[in-house]
Amino acid sequence: MRIDKNFVNNQFASSTKGAMISVYNPVDNTVVGQVQAATADEAIDAVAIAAAAQKGWRQLTSIERAGYMHKLADALVARKDAIGRALADESGKSLEDATNEAVYAADITRYHAEWARRIEGEIIPSDTPCESLLLQREPIGVVACLIPFNYPVYTLLRKIAPALITGNAVVVRPSNNTPCSAFEIAKAIQDSGMPAGVVNILTMDHATAETVCTHPKVGMITLTGSVGAGRKVLEYSQVNIAKSSLELGGKSPAIVEADADLEKAAREIVASKTTNCGQLCTAIERVYVHEAVYEPFVELLRANLAERQFGDRALNPSFMGPLINENARLNIHQMVERAIDDGAKLEVGGYIPEGPGHFYPPTLLTHCRQDMEIVQEEIFGPVLPVLKYSDADEALALANDHQFGLASVIYTENYRTAMKVANNIEAGEIYINRTPSDPYQGYHAGWKRSGLGGDDGKHGMLEFTQTRLVVLNY
């Protein structure tokens, strides 16, 4: 069993007064590691160290910062096996998927490093003769990065890479469910020669996290998490008027038109819903099927879900893995039971398996209504509710009749229908004839309760900047 300590000022803490947090493998609930939570005083010290380090980091040219980031990407690839092993043990992912996540984290680090020569300001005409207005992009200072459990390696670099290239320092709080992989990343940070104090990684309880987020030297809080967690961050940000970037819950609709490639759509929707056991904010969460193809499409979904086996991915990587913990499984099962009580029909799955681990079978529910909890609330598990519609206008109205607006999908061969939905969907992303994948160069941003700000691409990078107007009279 591994024991990890917090990473501050490019060193692992030799001792701490914080409580030990046990890390469990969700496949069999065995303890795979322990980490020492930071005390409030230790967290405050980490923020002070980050603030001091940021003053020197921002003075480097952006191309110099990019050099360190490319070295970090190299170090992540060199340590991908160790990172992958830690992630597989704490998350239940296959070793291949966990290792690949480290490679993807290196890729997005390189992507943001390449913005070094592209962080642009503006020159604006003045109303005054012999005067220019210069709008500059500047770093914010110290950024608190709150990382989720579902893709903790990728998301950690997705947050810190744009923060670093724009001249910020970071204090990272990994999920207490999956902290061990973060400390393997810390070793890569050491290997990269990154200046001390620029990246700091600490596990902490909620009270200590609040201490960090409300610290006057923290100028920005970035979170990937639930709507409830987002509301807490907004409360924290009010204390010092810190900037917030929030990627929150999703309830991605998939619209399946009568002219769609039904086999492709069913195969991809099921893959989206069962990848990482449905613990993905852009996973398909509700399916709207045209009445002309409803019965055959439901049968395709039923067959694909019934074929999808679950179990220990260390034994068979093709299995669907577990949910992160028992609370997640019980919450999902209770949602399914309430849906059935409310009139939904269980087609496949919908039970708690015997034996160890937090497994839940791929589950299909038909006869669902728009007002049901299972259609309105994020499931974050391998459960698909299906509804019928009569025309594209109705499907669009149903898809938009929702509190969330992160990702969306339509399957159709009619470009007019596709573009009508694309131009009117109330979501930050729409994928046509494919399921979501979050390209590095895109912009991953939710509408409505799905978030504020966003990640990826030019606009995700610029989230980590603030502007200064220079009025130059000559």
Image: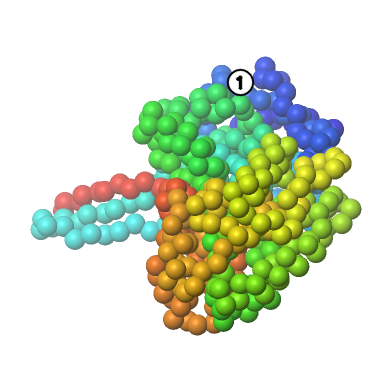
Question: Which sits in the foreground, 150 or 471?
Answer: 150
* Residue occupied by mark 1: 39
Residue 451 lies, in percent from the top left, at 46, 48
Q: How is the image coloured?
A: rainbow
Residue occupying the point 57% across, 69% down: 289
Q: Which residue is farthest right?
A: 315
Residue 448 lies, in percent from the top left, at 42, 51
Residue occupying the point 45% across, 28% down: 214
**Camera sees residue 65:** no
The kind of residue tagged 1 is: Thr
In the picture, measured across the screen, residue 358 lies left or right of residue 283, that is: right
Whether residue 307 is situated above or below residue 249 in the rendered picture: below
Residue 300 lies, in percent from the top left, at 71, 71
Residue occupying the point 41% across, 74% down: 420
Disc 1: CA contacts within 10 A as few (<14), some (14-19) or many (>=20): many
**Camera sees residue 173:** yes
Residue occupying the point 69% across, 56% down: 346
Whether residue 277 is situated above or below residue 148 in the rendered picture: below
Question: Which sits in the foreground, 305 or 437?
Answer: 305
Quadrant of image for the N terminus: top right
